[in-house]
């Protein structure tokens, strides 16, 4: 019996040892699997962090030179314009003064109450149809219904001469009537805001549709982003306005209008139907931010106090 117990004990000890080894092996495999899964999770966290950092760097690079956003895309400025007064420059002293019109009070303003979103969408479709006939090779494309100028590659053509009878399939009388009505409303709100007699204001050139995207500009004409002063570039300008036909953040990014003030840069974020307007002198040095993606549509509507530089509303040929 004693011998049998002695023989049995080694077998029991061996079984116990084997069981321990199996458990230890299972534990090692579980630990290895856990370490592997932890490594995968850590790798995923690193990748996500890098993506977030890249997005953050991209956004902050767009915003890096913006000191203040005057009006954001999601805001609705109605019924009264939001007005920011600035001191008039001496630019106007170099030109003949027209009482009741020449800027005495300068500034910049924004309103969403002059043009409805639906009207702006109709005007955008007008611009899309017109610019679909040609367009520049990159950067900005221009359609001027007054002079007929249309970007075509690296040059401009006269849309009325070049396309002639085809335009009846592109534009309608209703399109041109809406264009005139919108121009009259913009003129009226500028006059009211700056205390002018609207009858002493005249539409002037260039007044045009613009389409801007992220493609590389091939000519200097298509480089829309350079800082400039409207009164210096076009001596006839006294008041400048922009009607936006697309939305910042959903139709495009970049492309914001930036006022370059001595103490910082201030921007207006485009919104479909939004009208931004300002006195055209050095007090409103500005530029347009480069479009990062998407397409930005707008109309620049310009006014002068000099009747010699006035132009008529466009009409169907």
Image (cartoon, rainbow, N blue to C red):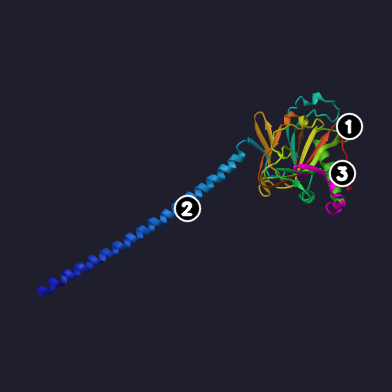
| Distance from the alpha carbon under mark 1 to that under mark 2 | 67 Å
For the residues labelled 3 and 2, the Cα–Cα distance comes to 59 Å
Between residues 121 and 117, which one lies in front from this camera angle? Answer: 121
Residue that label 1 marks: 308
Judge left or right: residue 55 versus residue 175.
left
> Whole-Å distance between the Cαs marked 3 and 1?
18 Å
Q: Residue at x 41, y 53 (%)?
A: 39
Q: Which stretch appears magenta? A: 151-172
Disc 1 on helix, strand or loop? helix
- Judged from the image, the secondary structure of the residue bearing numbered disc 2 is helix
Q: How dense is the environment of label 3, judged by Cα within 10 Å: few (below 14), some, or many (20 and up)?
A: some
The residue identified by callout 2 is 44
Q: Residues within 10 Å of mark 2 (few under 14, many from 20)?
A: few
Q: Position of residue 75 (x, y in %)?
A: 69, 44
- Does the magenta-highlighted stretch encompass residue 153? yes
Residue at the extreme left:
2
Whether residues under marks 3 and 1 lie with C-beta atoms below 8 angstroms apart, the answer is no
Q: Residues within 10 Å of mark 1 (few under 14, many from 20)?
A: few
* Image quarter of the N terminus: bottom left
**In the displayed image of the protein, which residue is found farthest to the bottom?**
1
Q: Residue at (84%, 41%) from the top-left corner?
A: 147
- Counting from the top left corner in percent of width and height, residue 176 is at 85, 48
First along the sequence among labels 1 and 2: 2
Which residue is tagged 3? Answer: 314
The spot of residue 5 in percent (x, y) is 13, 72
Asked whether the residues under the numbered discs 1 and 2 touch, taking CB atoms below 8 Å apart as contact, a structural biologist would say no
- SS at circle 3: loop
45 lies above or below 226: below
Disc 3 to disc 2: CB gap under 8 Å = no
Image disc number at residue 13: none
Between 209 and 8, the one lying in front of the other is 209
């Amino acid at each position: 019996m004693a011998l049998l117990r002695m023989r049995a004990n080694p077998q029991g000890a061996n079984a116990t040892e084997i069981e321990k080894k199996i458990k230890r092996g299972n534990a090692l495999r579980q630990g290895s699997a856990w370490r592997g899964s932890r490594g995968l999770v850590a790798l995923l966290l690193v990748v996500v962090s890098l993506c977030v950092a890249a997005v953050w760097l991209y956004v902050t690079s767009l915003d890096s030179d913006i000191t203040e956003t005057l009006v954001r895309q999601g805001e609705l400025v109605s019924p009264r314009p939001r007005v920011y007064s600035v001191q008039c420059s001496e630019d106007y002293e170099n030109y003949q003064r027209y009482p009741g019109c020449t800027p005495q009070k300068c500034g910049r303003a924004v309103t969403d109450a002059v043009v409805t979103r639906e009207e702006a969408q109709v005007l955008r479709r007008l611009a899309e149809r017109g610019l679909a006939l040609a367009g520049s090779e990159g950067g900005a494309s221009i359609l001027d219904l007054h002079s007929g100028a249309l970007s075509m590659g690296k040059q401009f053509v006269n849309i009325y001469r070049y396309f002639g009878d085809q335009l009846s399939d592109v534009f309608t009388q209703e399109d041109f009537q809406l264009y005139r009505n919108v121009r009259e409303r913009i003129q009226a709100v500028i006059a009211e805001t700056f205390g002018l007699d609207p009858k002493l204001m005249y539409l002037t050139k260039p007044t045009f549709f613009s389409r801007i995207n992220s493609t590389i500009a091939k000519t200097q004409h298509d480089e829309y982003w350079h800082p400039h002063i409207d009164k210096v570039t076009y001596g006839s300008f006294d008041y400048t306005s922009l009607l936006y036909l697309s939305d910042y953040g959903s139709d495009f990014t970049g492309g914001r209008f930036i006022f370059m003030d001595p103490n910082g840069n201030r921007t207006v974020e485009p919104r479909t139907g939004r009208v931004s307007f300002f006195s055209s002198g050095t007090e409103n040095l500005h530029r347009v931010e480069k479009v990062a993606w998407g397409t930005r549509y707008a109309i620049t509507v310009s006014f002068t106090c000099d009747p010699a530089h006035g132009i008529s509303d466009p009409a169907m040929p």
